[in-house]
Image (cartoon, grey):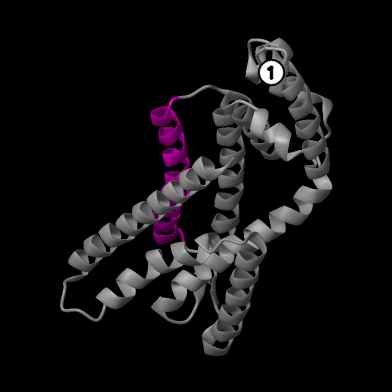
Amino acid sequence: MIKQKVELSEKSRKFLEDLHVYLFSSGKNEKEMKEIVEELEDHFVEAEKNGKSIEHIIGQSPKNYMDEISAEMPVDYKAWFKYIPLIITGAFSFIIISDLFKGTLTYSLLEIVGFIVIVGIFLEGTSISFRYVSANDLNRKKEFSILFILGMLPMILFLALILLNSTIETPIVHFGITGTVIIAIIAFIFLTAFSIWTRSWVLIIFIALLSLPNFFLSFTALTESARLMTGTLITFAGIAIYLLIISRTDKSKRIKLP
C-alpha cells in the first residue's frame, strides 16, 4: 500500500482526497468510502503504470464522476444521527464556555432555538461548500473565498439573532450560579474529550481567542468601544495566525511524504 501511494501522481492523490471529502459531506458511510477510494487508488496505480491519465478512468468531468459514485451509495443516516447531537452539543459548549466570562448563564427561548437553527444552517452550508470545492477545479483565491464566506456565515447569523432577540421578547431561562457551574463543568469535559478524540485542540483554541481578549481587556481603562474594537482585532489576528501555522505545518508534512 505504501508503494502504491508513492507511485501516484499529485493529481491522482488530490482527486482521491477530494472524492473522500465529497462523499463524506454527502453523508456516506465511512467504511464504504474507504473501500471505494482504495479500489480507485489501485486503478489509478495501474493506469499510471501504463502511461494513462486519471481521465482515462473518470472521464473529463470529476464532478460528474463523483456524482455518479455518490448516487450509487446510500446516505448513512445512522451515523449522522450520532454525529448531529455531538455537533449540536459541541456548538452549545462553545457558546457556553464563551459566555462564562460574562457571568451566570441566562438565555432567552429565542436564543436557544436560534442556536439550534444556526447550527443546522451551518451544517448544510458546510456540506454544500465542501462538495462544491472538492468537485470543482478552483484556484486558491476562489477556494479561500468560499471557505471564508462559510466561516463568516455563523457570525453573521449570530449577529442577526442578537438583533432579533433585542426586539422580540421571549421567556428567559436563568441557570443561576449552581446551574452555571454544573453546565460549565459538563461543557468543559465534553470539549476536552472531543478534542482528545479528534486529536485537535482547534475548538479550545478558538474559544480562547474569542473570549480571553475581551475578558482581559475588561480590566483595562479602555472605553467599551475601544475594548470591543481591540478585542475583535486580537481575535481575528489570532485566528489568522493559527490558520497560517496549521497551513504551513500541513504543507511541511506533505513535502516530507515519500
Left or right: 23 with respect to 97?
Answer: right
Q: Quadrant of residue 28?
A: top right
Query: Residue shown at 53%/42% (left/top)?
Result: 254
Q: Quadrant of residue 14?
A: top right
- Give the quarter of the figure containing the C terminus: top right
Inspect this view and state whether residue 26 appears: no
- Give the quarter of the figure containing the N terminus: top right
Point out residue 188 in the picture as x, y percentages from the top left corner: 57, 76
Query: Residue shown at 72%/32% (left/top)?
Result: 4
Q: Quadrant of residue 229?
A: bottom left
Inspect this view and state whether residue 176 appears: yes
The residue positioned farthest toward the bottom in the image shown: 178
Left or right: 52 with respect to 102?
Answer: right
Residue on which the image places disc 1: 48
**Predominant secondary structure, magenta span:** helix
Q: Is residue 167 magenta?
A: yes
Point out residue 38 in the picture as x, y percentages from the top left corner: 78, 34
Amino acid carrying mark 1 in the image: Glu
In the rendered view, would you say 92 is above or below 14? below
Query: Residue shown at 57%/41% (left/top)?
Result: 126
Secondary structure of residue under mark 1 = helix
Q: Which residues are magenta?
A: 139-168
Point out residue 74 in the picture as x, y percentages from the top left corner: 84, 34
Left or right: 67 with respect to 76?
Answer: left
Point out residue 3 in the picture as x, y percentages from the top left corner: 72, 35
Q: Nearer the viewer, residue 204 or 100?
A: 204
Q: Is residue 16 magenta?
A: no
User: How many neighbours does mark 1 have within 10 angstroms: few (below 14), some (14-19), or many (20 or more)?
Assistant: some
Q: Nearer the viewer, residue 233 or 179?
A: 233
Query: Residue shown at 50%/41% (left/top)?
Result: 255
In the rendered view, would you say 212 is above or below 67? below
